[in-house]
Image (cartoon, rainbow, N blue to C red):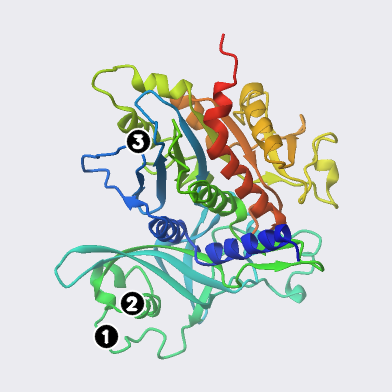
Amino acid sequence: MSSKESSVVGSAKDFLKFINKSPSPFHAVEESKKRLLEAGFKELNEAEKWSVKPGDKFFLTRNHSTLVAFAVGGKFQPGNGFSIIGTHTDSPCLKIKPTSKIVKNGYLQVGVQLYGGGIWHTWFDRDLKLAGRVLIRNSKSQIEHKLVDIDKPLLRVSTVAIHLSRDQNEKFEFNKETTLVPILAMATNSSSEKNDGRDSPSKQTVDKHHNALLNAVANKLGCSAKDIIDLELCLADYVPGTIGGLNDDFIFCGRLDNLHSTYCALQGLLDSLKASDSLEKEPNIRMVSMFDNEEVGSESAQGAASALQEHILRRLSYDDSNASAFEQCICQSLLVSADMAHAVHPNFSEKHEEHHRPFLNKGVVLKFNANQKYASTAITSSIMREIAHEASIPIQDFVMRNDMACGSTIGPILSTRLGIPTLDLGSPQLSMHSIREMCSTSSVHLAISLFKAYFENYSKMYARIIKN
């Protein structure tokens, strides 16, 4: 195996470690924090005064589901630019309702909400686990945030037998409220609603969720069910992500959209800092912003439509002797909105415009839309093409057919709110928004390499642009 092949496989395997530890946005942020701390980054608190100087490496989180990490160039001064990659941590999923307790026809079932635009029929007949965050009251009567991942096939949404629904091979229809309801246990099992020797759940939760569910969460956390104040849990595929295909060409897993981009952006930043002198001559701040709630429009305190990104840029560019430092920094910056792209499907190639059919193994995809569903411009795309060319990284283009609606990303949202030059790109994949998605094994290494090159070279590339 050549060194390049080894890097491709190594990157794919490390990505799978990341994604298998990230069944929820909270877990993705926690895993990112661990990697940042190992790389020498320190955590900041939004509520405190910051002291940031050239050469520093920091990160901060909001709601435990959004994370922003940055490394300050050795030659940075207020008014200089930011080299930013923006991604998102959330994916379509089933989320447990605030009151989830359902008993029906001898089964314990769990009520769920549909989060985002998932391909919901793919959630049927899958072994599902439970993960997310729990708010508990600790021994000091403080409210504490805990992560939980019950890594076992705990729930299942079963289809009805073909004998009882003869036409389902012609049209598989279901009611999202009454049919997409997972089974947890048999109600006839006398132990299913018993307490397990621990204290009973508190009154505020016992009427909302099954005792069996709360006790399973409490057991995992090593606390009492009565200490659970609230929970925010989602369902996820129990089967881990894996490398597959005859020649190990593919990655099969959930949440590729958009943890693939999140992982690659983070790793690209870390790789760009590995050389001891990597920041010495850098005039910019290198930044990765991982937002929650993109799949539902980004309209939240921790979403890209919030003021979070602006607040951070303002704090880092503040100069009491230069009132326009923030405005100066914006025009010199570049935001790369990294979100997955649509690879051409061999069985549905007509869904793509014939001259814009990205392939799984032929490079990162630049995304364009004349109606600004993507924020790429000729200037921002030219910058990335030059960076990719000098790093020998292949690039593809994507435009949606005129007779089909185009999705969007955090790119147009942030470019509108900040006025920052923006580019939309992503790695190509199949089965987007399915419970189980698919991309090429090589895409991880390619995206990391491109993002590393971007962080190392954007400030130099900006200096080459004729400004008039």
In the depicted structure, whether residue 451 falls above or below residue 232: above
The 10 Å Cα crowd at callout 3, few under 14, some 14 to 19, many 20 or more, is some
Cα distance in 3D space between marks 3 and 1: 44 Å
The 10 Å Cα crowd at callout 2, few under 14, some 14 to 19, many 20 or more, is many
Q: Amino acid at mark 3?
A: Ile
Q: Secondary structure at mark 2?
A: helix
Q: How many labels sit on residues?
A: 3
Q: Which mark is residue 218?
A: 2
Question: Where residue 170 appears, x then y in whole percent?
Answer: 81, 60
Q: Amino acid at mark 1?
A: Arg
Q: Secondary structure at mark 3?
A: helix
Q: Quadrant of the C terminus?
A: top right
Nearer the observer: mark 3 or 1; the answer is 3
Q: Secondary structure at mark 1?
A: loop
Residue at left 55%, top 62%? 19
Question: Where residue 225 appears, x then y in whole percent?
Answer: 29, 76
Q: Which mark is residue 312?
A: 3
Q: Relative to 325, is 430 on the left or the right?
A: right
User: Circle 1 sits on which residue?
Assistant: 198
Q: Which mark is residue 248?
A: none
Mark closest to the chain's N terminus, 3 or 1: 1
The 10 Å Cα crowd at callout 1, few under 14, some 14 to 19, many 20 or more, is few
Q: Quadrant of the N terminus?
A: bottom right
Q: Amino acid at mark 2?
A: Ala
Residue at left 34%, top 26%? 78
Does the CB distance between marks 2 and 1 fall below 8 Å? yes
> Which residue is nearer to you in this view: 372 or 269?
269
